[in-house]
Image (cartoon, rainbow, N blue to C red):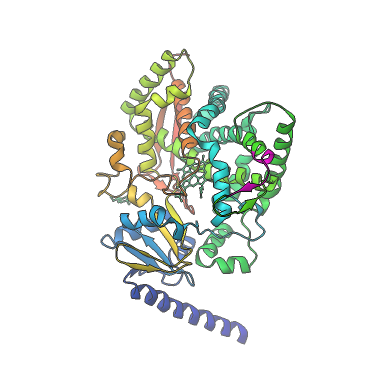
Amino acid sequence: MIVLVALIILIVLLVGVHRKRNEYYWKKRGVVFWRKSKTLGVFWHYVSGQKSMFQIFDEMYREYSDASEVAFGTFLTPSIFVKNLVNIHHVTIIDFQSFSHRGLAFGKNDKLANNVALLHGPKWKIIRQAMSPLFTPAKIKKMHYIVDKCAQDFIQLLKRNPNKLNGDAYMTMKTYCCAALTGAVFGIGTESPFESPFIKITSQALAPTLWSNIKFMISGVSPQLFNFLGLSLFSVQEKLFTKTIKQVIEDRKLSDEKKHDFVDLCVNLQNGGVLLDSDTGFQLQPTHEIMAAQAFIFFMAGLEPCAAGLFGALFELGRNPEMQKRLQRDIDAAFEKYDGEMTYDAIMEMKYLDKVIKETLRMYPPVGFLTRECVRDTKLPVGNIKIDAGTKVYLPIYSQHNDSKYFPDPEVFDPERFSNEKELADVFIPFGQGSRICLGLRYAYIQIKTGIVHILRHFDIEAYMRNGVVSYKKEHMFVRLKDVDLALVPRKTIF
Ligand code: HEM
Ligand SMILES: *[C@@H]1O[C@H](CO)[C@@H](O)[C@H](O)[C@H]1NC(C)=O
């Protein structure tokens, strides 16, 4: 009993000290301090409330409309939400060397965490270089046949199962995205890509359960504690990914077939021997485990955002029938021009489609904010703010896209905003920016566009809203629509 009381007193004292300490720390640097939850900051609001993390940041963004930065308490780790465009540029691009870390903690024994999204330093650099050839425009063009085949199979699947046409459309769209991603990563096999085990695995790894919310909080407020407690993020998924990738790489080495997928790249890398970064002299063996960790992050980082992009676009097209008709006319014309095939070139030629997808990613950016960790003491130029190594930096995506300063009437879906795309380059950042920009950007566009084209060729979309307004699921980093759904109505013309 006495121990318990002592413990509670100790915690209360610690919390009290850290409130003051955090506030003082930032006051000295001339940065306003978030008035809510001064000890655990946004993480406390997230864990104890119903809001998605990006909404909490968005409230902060709008409450402190004149501030160029807002700091908040995260126990031992200083944290800052940067709103000023010049400083955001500085963090992501200009002073990348000081902010090269994504700042998400993972366990020492998390083998799947050895991936391009979570690593930093020379190991990140060498893996990013090794993976980049998979995502060049030329490579995406070669890969397009895989995505297109999956989209065609998906339409057949929908036609055979009319029960999938009405309701739970997000999950249905996710099946297509997962099939296409499985094809692009592991190549198309003989088995149905729609029975991919990865859909369940990634959903499990990402599900915002109470426990994963708490782990997310610990990782945010104290990476040291995360490691001290021996937490790990992905131990459940490790076996399946490592086993699968080992098998397909070994099989591919025995065949001469070129499929232009991720496995081809793995075979090339492994045949080339040790990876060497000529700048730093850093070396890395491209083992099966390393390859499995990259395959894993492609699913983790790629699946939900692509499904959200596809679903969001269909939702807005359902709400805006005249835009839907216009896009269908473009799509029908392209199918005619290319003799019933939807080639990569045909998709790249469709300007209106491009604007619709971009406006969707503007209005519903699937990833709501960016994170970085400072790795060496530095300064932010506007306000001359001193930033110590170890500081966590958060940058808005959603709030920037929802700011009328950059996008007048942000709640209006208007693809024509993207008629002058160059002007928006600084403020439209659904894939992040700088050296850590989304690796799968080009692939994501082609996968979403191919899906839309085949779906609208065969179906009209109707959108439903439960409460007459859009709302959002409680998520760590994602922006996921809630209480909205779609019906796919077969078009009258039969192709
Ligand atoms: C619409 C779909 C997608 C969106 C909106 C999206 C968004 C993002 C964002 C915002 C980041 C952080 C960038 C930064 O910190 O500056 C990111 C990183 C990343 N994304 Fe995507 N992504 C999408 C699809 C994909 C796909 C399909 C893949 C893989 C095939 C992928 C792989 C990655 C990887 C590996 C990183 C980490 C890059 C690094 O740290 O070097 N993403 N993505
Ligand atoms: C977007 O901004 C508007 C004000 O322009 C605000 O009312 C709305 O709540 C914001 N959206 C979210 C999800 O925070």
In x, y percent, where is residue 484? 42, 40
**Left or right: where 63 falls relative to 1:** left
| Furthest residue in direction bottom, as rendered | 2
Q: Was residue 221 drawn as part of the magenta stretch in this picture?
A: no
Position of residue 65 relative to residue 322, above or below, is: below
Residue at x-position 71% and y-position 48%: 239
Q: Nearer the viewer, residue 64 or 265?
A: 265
Residue at x-position 53% and y-position 82%: 10
In x, y percent, where is residue 477? 47, 52
Q: Nearer the viewer, residue 356 or 108?
A: 108
In x, y percent, where is residue 131? 57, 42
Residue at x-position 39% and y-position 24%: 349
Query: Could one spot residue 181 in this view of the protein?
Result: yes
In which quadrant of the rendered image does the N terminus lie? bottom right
Quarter of the view holding residue 310: top left
How many numbered marks appear? 0
**Left or right: where 478 falls relative to 325:** right
Residue at x-position 37% and y-position 49%: 398
**Left or right: where 280 falls relative to 425:** right
Q: Nearer the viewer, residue 370 or 487?
A: 370
Query: Could one spot residue 167 in this view of the protein?
Result: no
What residue range appears in magenta?
269-277
Position of residue 289 relative to residue 172, above or below, is: below
**Left or right: where 267 falls relative to 142:** right
Q: Nearer the viewer, residue 369 or 138?
A: 138
In x, y percent, where is residue 400? 33, 50
